[in-house]
Image: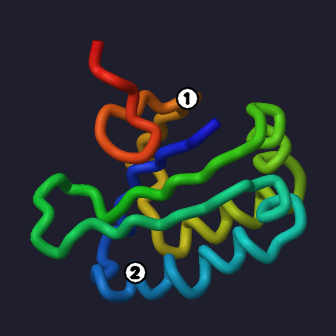
């Protein structure tokens, strides 16, 4: 299962400060905290391009072995620590999340043959 989270920086924070915090503080927190990193198969941060006009500052993509692993990551002290840290750099009211299962590859490795 993959989670795609579209994120915006908190009001008053510069793009540079947002990216610095996201990359050097929040990412390592997810990676290094028991109950977060050990429940996550992968965590990839995709910052928006400086010329992007979508209104989003980036997209985080996390992969989990199961829905249960995702739910377990949210619970307990580790989940609370993650949410508390998000308040340092994100506008939590604006986060949009999409959950997916298997991808359908059209072009690239694993692409399905045209029928």
Residue 58 position within the rendered picture, expressed as x and y whole percent measured from the top left:
35, 62
Residue 86 position within the rendered picture, expressed as x and y whole percent measured from the top left:
57, 65
Q: Nearer the viewer, residue 19 or 86?
A: 19
Which quadrant of the figure has residue 82?
Answer: bottom right
Q: Nearer the viewer, residue 51 or 75?
A: 51
Of the residues tagged 1 and 2, which is closer to the observer? 1
**Which residue bears the numbered disc 1?**
102
Label 1, residues with CA under 10 Å away: few <14, some 14-19, many ≥20: few
Label 2, residues with CA under 10 Å away: few <14, some 14-19, many ≥20: many
Image side of residue 44 versus residue 109, left or right: right
Residue 25 position within the rendered picture, expressed as x and y whole percent measured from the top left:
60, 83
Image mark for residue 110: none
**Residue displayed at 64% across by 36% down:** 1
**Residue displayed at 40% across by 80% down:** 19
**Residue displayed at 29% across by 12% down:** 115
Mark closer to the chain start, 1 or 2: 2
Q: Secondary structure at mark 1?
A: loop
Image side of residue 29 versus residue 89, left or right: right
Cα distance between the residues tagged 1 and 2: 29 Å
Q: Secondary structure at mark 2?
A: helix
- Judge whether 31 appears above or below 16 on screen: above
Q: Nearer the viewer, residue 69 or 114?
A: 114
**Which residue bears the numbered disc 2?**
19
**Residue displayed at 29% across by 83% down:** 14
Residue 53 position within the rendered picture, expressed as x and y whole percent measured from the top left:
11, 59
């Amino acid at each position: 299962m993959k989670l795609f989270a579209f994120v915006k920086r908190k009001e008053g924070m510069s793009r540079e400060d947002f990216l610095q915090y996201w990359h050097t503080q929040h990412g390592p927190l997810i990676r290094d905290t028991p109950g977060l990193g050990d429940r996550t198969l992968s965590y990839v941060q995709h910052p928006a391009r400086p010329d992007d006009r979508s209104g989003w500052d980036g997209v985080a993509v996390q992969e989990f072995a199961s829905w249960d692993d995702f739910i377990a990551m949210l619970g307990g002290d580790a989940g609370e620590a993650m949410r508390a840290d998000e308040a340092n750099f994100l506008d939590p009211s604006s986060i949009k999340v999409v959950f997916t299962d298997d991808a359908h590859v059209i072009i690239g490795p694993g692409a399905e043959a045209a029928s």
